[in-house]
Amino acid sequence: MMESKSNFVDYVKIYCRSGQGGSGSRSMRREKYVPKGGPDGGDGGRGGHIILRANRNYWTLVHLKYNRHIRAEHGESGSKSRSTGKSGADKIIDVPCGTVVRNEETGEILFEITEHGEERVLLEGGRGGLGNWHFRTPTRQAPRFAQPGEPYKEMTVILELKLLADVGLVGFPNAGKSTLISAVSAARPEIADYPFTTLEPNLGMVEYRDGKSFVMADIPGIIEGASEGKGLGLRFLRHIERNSLLLFVIPADSQDIKKEYRILLKELEQYNPEILDKQRVLAISKSDLLDDELMELIKDSRLPQIPYVFISSVTGYGIQELKDLLWTELNKESNLISPIEEKSTEEGSSLSSDPIEESNEELTENTITNLEKEEGKEEE
């Protein structure tokens, strides 16, 4: 989990419990002048669901940091006159777009939420039990038993946030990534002349021509050996897994630009080889330190075989050229973001529209016999 003064949290573990279904009623109709009115017990109400909803107004999981036990309401029991009990209220958990939900016990990814307003049922509430009215037959006209509600479901889940951005900045500490994102957007990350100034991801909206824009993500710098835990490690790289383009930022005063680029690629590959399938662009930062002759020397020093541009975030040199290049690369047909294939989960993916009708299918002779046995024990 990452934390800082701004309370950025991208990892939480929470316990969730849905609501239990209400019990069916064993009420018998009792009215004046209506002898032997028969059963009129209503059904129990459905227990509340645990639902996760993507909300673009959230960009961190900090609101769940101190709220790690989330429970939905239980359904109420049925009552006389065939009145159905009130269903338990669903518990809706708002999370940022890009949240991954994982079963804490098995490590299985249950689903991912990426679109604003998208809702996924994590745990369904128990169905309400049937009232004794459902158990009447020509030979059993006064059943004094009813069906209990289904029990609740519970699970401890891990929520991991992967920020959604079009462009992800990759580079060593002090490469000029934070200065760049502050130059092209309204983001204002902390900037200082020492390594690891950036301790958390920053998002910025980059304004382009004709009202167009794209999102850029700045993550803390990585160093050689990060895959082995050196520096800040690779725990931040989950935030660029969904970026469609990687912008490598390497300063012009680097001893060997191509070598630094290869080191960064190696660390990314150690984390997740699939990241290397993304489109890449190189920005050579701090180019205000160069004259034309030095710039030509760098061009002739076998730069990586990817699109590149010389920039200076301080003077603005090359910034518009960089925006043009990024926009062109982002809109290449081969680089368009395809819909994320979400795993279809049999459990917790659909709501029961009519729990009473579904429960009727379970009214086997064994079920009725068991209910009658329970009734007999209570009478004893």
Image (cartoon, rainbow, N blue to C red):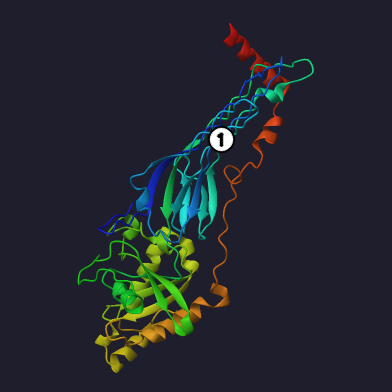
Q: Farthest residue in the bottom direction?
A: 292
How far across and down, in percent of the image, does residue 318 sit? 36, 86
**In front: 27, or 62?**
27
| Residue 302 visible to an observer of this rendering | no
Callout 1: SS: loop
Asked if 185 appears above or below 339 in the picture, the reply is below
Q: Quarter of the image holding residue 144?
A: top right
**In front: 315, or 329?**
315
- Looking at the image, which residue is at 51% across and 54% down? 112
Q: Quarter of the image holding residue 150?
A: top right
Number of on-image labels: 1
Kindly identify the amino acid type of the residue bearing the numbered disc 1.
Answer: Lys
Q: Farthest residue in the right direction?
A: 138
How far across and down, in percent of the image, does residue 336 sit? 55, 72
Q: Farthest residue in the front direction?
A: 33
How far across and down, in percent of the image, does residue 368 sit? 69, 19
The quarter of the rendered structure image containing the C terminus is top right
| Residue 310 visible to an observer of this rendering | yes
* Residue corresponding to mark 1: 86
Q: Residues within 10 Å of mark 1 (few under 14, many from 20)?
A: some
In the image, is 235 to the left or to the right of 325? left
